[in-house]
Image: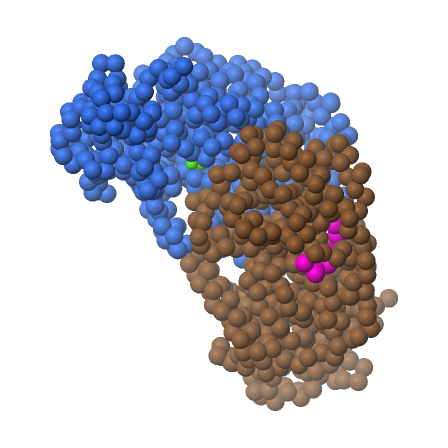
Chain colours: A blue, B brown
Amino acid sequence: MPPKSRTLKLHPKDNIVIALADLAAGSECTADGPNALQSVKQGHKIAIAPIAAGQNVLRYGQIIGQAKSDIAPGEHVHVHNLGMGDHSQDYAFASEAKNLDPITEGRTFDGFHRADGRVGTRNYLGILTSVNCSGSVAKFIAEAAEKNGFLDEFPNIDGIVPITHGTGCGMSGENEGYATLMRTLAGYAQHPNFGGILLIGLGCEVMQVSALVGDHPIRADGALRYMTIQHEGGTRKTIEKGLSELRGIAELANTATRKPAPVSELMVGMQCGGSDGYSGITANPALGAASDLLVRHGGTTILSETSEIYGAEHLLTRRAVSERVGEKLIERVRWWEDYTARNKGEMDNNPSPGNKRGGLTTILEKSLGAVAKSGSAPLTEVYLFGEKVDTKGFVFMDSPGFDPCSVTGQIASGSNLIVFTTGRGSVSGYMPTPCIKVATNSEMYNRMSEDMDVNCGDIISDDISLESKGRDIFELFIRIASGEKTKSEELGFGGVEFVPWQIGAVM
Amino acid sequence: MPPKSRTLKLHPKDNIVIALADLAAGSECTADGPNALQSVKQGHKIAIAPIAAGQNVLRYGQIIGQAKSDIAPGEHVHVHNLGMGDHSQDYAFASEAKNLDPITEGRTFDGFHRADGRVGTRNYLGILTSVNCSGSVAKFIAEAAEKNGFLDEFPNIDGIVPITHGTGCGMSGENEGYATLMRTLAGYAQHPNFGGILLIGLGCEVMQVSALVGDHPIRADGALRYMTIQHEGGTRKTIEKGLSELRGIAELANTATRKPAPVSELMVGMQCGGSDGYSGITANPALGAASDLLVRHGGTTILSETSEIYGAEHLLTRRAVSERVGEKLIERVRWWEDYTARNKGEMDNNPSPGNKRGGLTTILEKSLGAVAKSGSAPLTEVYLFGEKVDTKGFVFMDSPGFDPCSVTGQIASGSNLIVFTTGRGSVSGYMPTPCIKVATNSEMYNRMSEDMDVNCGDIISDDISLESKGRDIFELFIRIASGEKTKSEELGFGGVEFVPWQIGAVM
Ligand SMILES: [Ca+2]
Ligand SMILES: [Ca+2]
Ligand SMILES: [Ca+2]
Ligand SMILES: [Ca+2]
Ligand SMILES: [Ca+2]
């Protein structure tokens, strides 16, 4: 059965459509629109309305550039007739922040209500580590607990999760790399998907357990214990005492059970990895529709990956709720320009020759493929990597594009769900937060269906609308949040994917 | 029983001794030497010969500075009468490179002889990963193999070691960070302690499996297979095929058995972590004696941790066998000055106020505490992080001081033994290479004896000579290399300590 539709209009306001297959000249573009004036390759754009020279070209309802000459309906739109003016000062802060209509259906999910008011979607015990040097001992404690049937007594606990990493020492104790790691570890220690935390240090590391724990209870429920290997007198003694500390924590964590919570308590970290030519036209805009739905229900969605939205920051500043929020985003972009320059690189998200062959014309258009995940909701706040997100609505958290690192920041910030679009097929999972995998194309979905939770390939093959797919994803948010397992949870992922952002020299 | 000696002379050429306890004025410094002219605190220096103003003060037989005024025997030597002239151009390349007398006893260890001529001290199967995103699958394959008794058929194989990490993507594909990771992964893939390698990638990462494997066999024995999760069609299929590939590798690896090899085939990575006031007077110089012994037997020892030898590079350039080798070291030091500066830090290894209270006077003296591990052998070559070491004798490999990162480089360079001095008590282990832990003091050794292989505290408490302790360590090298397990191997360490040096921006 051939595809029902051979082009895709990504937003009602768009004045172009995307060819879903190589089209011959004269092909019909849309049922009620023009025919193609030239042959157009798959993934390329065709005008569906007259666009005068200088007028904006819209994709996802967003500006991707301006016509360099008059463009007729049916005409191929690409580098020959679409350009981008210098817009570097044109932030137009808050000019396009339009609130979405709230939905007041009172939808709920079944979650774990925590003492700090947040709601978890899982109830794990975490064994957190301040430094690589205590990572093995954290794993030994988890293994010993598993071997002795520790959790049999605690049926409400989902599992024991050692969180290990490759840093925590060989670093300055006062720069932004240290502050970033501190935020990340604190965010995990307080995460609502943990019913309790055992924190293990070595003892002599730069990232001191005492600095992490601070003067006041880091968890409102008191379900945190800590110890260092050097203080306890070595590996075996730490394992022994760790098991006994874990029992105290487990008794607290086991009192939690799933109870209804408004979906406004969902905080969804949005991510893409292993993108392909379909990411920007299927999975990402479908996720954007789901994001808008969750925002309309009062929930929170987080966009990140600063290096991959570079070039589209001017469109996010327009969606910012205030000049202050827009300026915070620009400040992160400037920080990134410095970060890459001092590391002898540069921010470069321009379409590559391959991108251009695939139909992407401008840096705005390319970056919008990533931004499409965020739908059309106003941008309510901008956060640092791993900073606690305390605002509802659509927010931005600064991070690299590198998947495990970006997701680590989103979880540290409080995400109790992750949704991850992928074209090539990324398979990772991220404890303690479930990760929903959304395939951009049916070929990969069919080949890797054991790892994928959602297929967006049928947006093309079966003419499923982005809105309908967005509703499906939103409903899956609720089911997964209520305890249904994702594919990556069923497979047991999450043991190595905690990757704090290491900024600065390793000393 | 009080200590037999209350001072320590670290080298026959030294003109100072170290107080091993707080000494009152009039205390005897050495059996045949002067009495203390003032009271002197533990860890501080006392002259045992007249030192004229401007004359060199020697510790470890090495210059740590010049007398600022005439110093009498028995006088306290510290910041008031010891300084350091500007020596920044005074590299005196190769001026003090004196070959040690070779020892031709024909000592051997029992090791695994590999097709490339190197000799392993262990015979593991490695499951190597190009990127964080394939780490969980590597672990799943190892777990599945363990569960089904895979190794029962292969009695000569020591175990299956998944090597996972937090990088491999979100990076440039052409800078020195990429080249460093490539060397590190290639070094592990070829390591003689692996009888065979299964290499797993995701598929879409920057660090491509195909680039790593290259055009020619990366292992002379052909015991390497590779696959990507995306090509195989997901997690379960990769585990299934991985187990079958592992069988082919195991059949090759299982043909290896331990056979005598000259100790000149030992390559020992030397490391210190969690240093204390005793590191520079007990464990490090004792290891220096062991290093000299191994070098005299034709073997190789590797000093690293560039940030911790900073300030003593002028002494290493003197020990360099040639101006070329000395200049390679200085080139690395200059690189580090730039690396830390561009990361908004600085190289600063100067004695802190605490160091000074403990008796350390100059940056040379402090850095020499770390360099003391290398004894007095000439410096035969300088290598990049993870670069294959192909020279005998004492060599330097550039690395951070951060233990797991530095050891990762030393193993990638080919170390088939690691020896790690520690004052505070570091407990980690580093697959696939056994790691010998050497305690600097008896208090920590007694408290953490289940983790420590050697106690150097008795150098002070029982007047054991550095030479005698060095011989003990050398003999332990041979036993561990021949199959005796270290404490950290018995405890099962090594699952999280692979930490490639991440240089540059995470993108
Ligand atoms: Ca709440
Ligand atoms: Ca991406
Ligand atoms: Ca990503
Ligand atoms: Ca050190
Ligand atoms: Ca170290």
| Residue in the picture at 76% in, 84% down | B33
Q: Is residue A310 a member of the stretch shown in magenta?
A: no
Q: Nearer the viewer, residue B59 or B296?
A: B296
**Residue B325 can be seen, yes or no:** yes
Of residues B470 and A253, the one drawn nearer to the viewer in this rendering: B470
**Quarter of image, res A2:** top left
Q: Nearer the viewer, residue B262 or A493?
A: B262
In the rendered image, the vertical position of residue A447 relative to residue B178, given as above or below: above
Q: Residue at x 43, y 26 (%)?
A: A440
Q: Quadrant of the C terminus of chain A?
A: bottom right
The image quarter in which residue B131 lies: top right
Q: Is residue B452 among what the camera can see?
A: no
Q: Against B49, is A436 above or below?
A: above
Region rendered in magenta: B116-123
Q: Residue at x 65, y 54 (%)?
A: B220
Percent from the top left, x then y, of residue A430? 55, 32
